[in-house]
Image (tube, grey):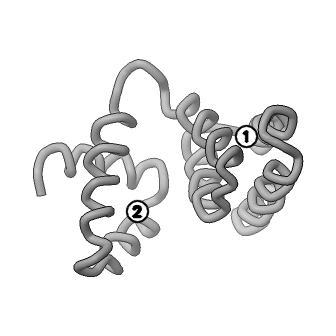
Amino acid sequence: MNEQFEKGLKVRKAVLGEEYVEKSLNSANHFTQAMQQLTTEWCWGEVWTREGLDRKTRSIINLSMLTALNRPHEIRVHVRGAINNGLSTDEIKEVFLQTAIYCGVPAAMDSFRIANEVFVELGLV
């Protein structure tokens, strides 16, 4: 592992949770390992560690983009990350309401449903 990977791994675990990240890394095989390496180094080690935006703001942006792209698995992961980064359930609700207008109601409905499932799992609603 290189320095960029280690830097990214630290942030990735802080945002997504150590258990989730360890499971992702440990379940990687010859085919998927390259994507784990790339994601950890560049997404988490290069972009998420930049000083230009705080983690809370980055979570807001991610939830918006993932809703626009209709990526339910990633929404689930990043709702948990947003909570870890200090967003409240009400702030997440507002992000999804905003995306409903600009990205479409069906995509936002999916994000609301997934977020609610995560909130129930975490005992937040």
Task: Write the residue at 61% across / 64% down.
Answer: 73
Residue 72 located left or right of residue 21:
right
Residue 29 placement (x, y as % from top left): 28, 80
Q: Nearer the viewer, residue 69 or 122?
A: 69
Circle 2: residue type: Glu
Residue underneath mark 1: 88
Picture quarter with the N terminus? bottom left
Could you say which disc has been placed on residue 22 in the image?
Answer: none
Task: Write the residue at 46% across / 59% down.
Answer: 17
Could you say which disc has been placed on residue 18 in the image?
Answer: 2
In terms of secondary structure, where does tag 2 sit?
helix
In terms of secondary structure, where does tag 1 sit?
loop
Q: Nearer the viewer, residue 102 or 18?
A: 102
Instruction: Tell me: residue 123, above or below residue 48.
Output: below
Task: Write the residue at 69% across / 54% down.
Answer: 70
Q: Nearer the viewer, residue 15 or 100?
A: 100
Where is residue 120, by image quadrant?
A: bottom right
Where is residue 45, by image quadrant?
A: top left
Residue 51 placement (x, y as % from top left): 37, 21
Task: Write the residue at 82% across / 61% down.
Answer: 113
Circle 1: residue type: Ser
Q: Earlier in the sequence, mark 1 or mark 2?
A: 2
Q: How many other residues sit within 10 Å of disc 2, few (<14), some (14-19) or many (≥20)? A: some
Instruction: Tell me: residue 25, above or below residue 9.
Output: below
Residue 27 located left or right of residue 89:
left
Alpha carbon of mark 1 to alpha carbon of mark 2: how far? 21 Å
Instruction: Tell me: residue 24, above or below residue 110.
Output: below
Residue 24 placement (x, y as % from top left): 39, 71
Instruction: Tell me: residue 20, above or below residue 59.
Output: below
Residue 55 located left or right of residue 112:
left
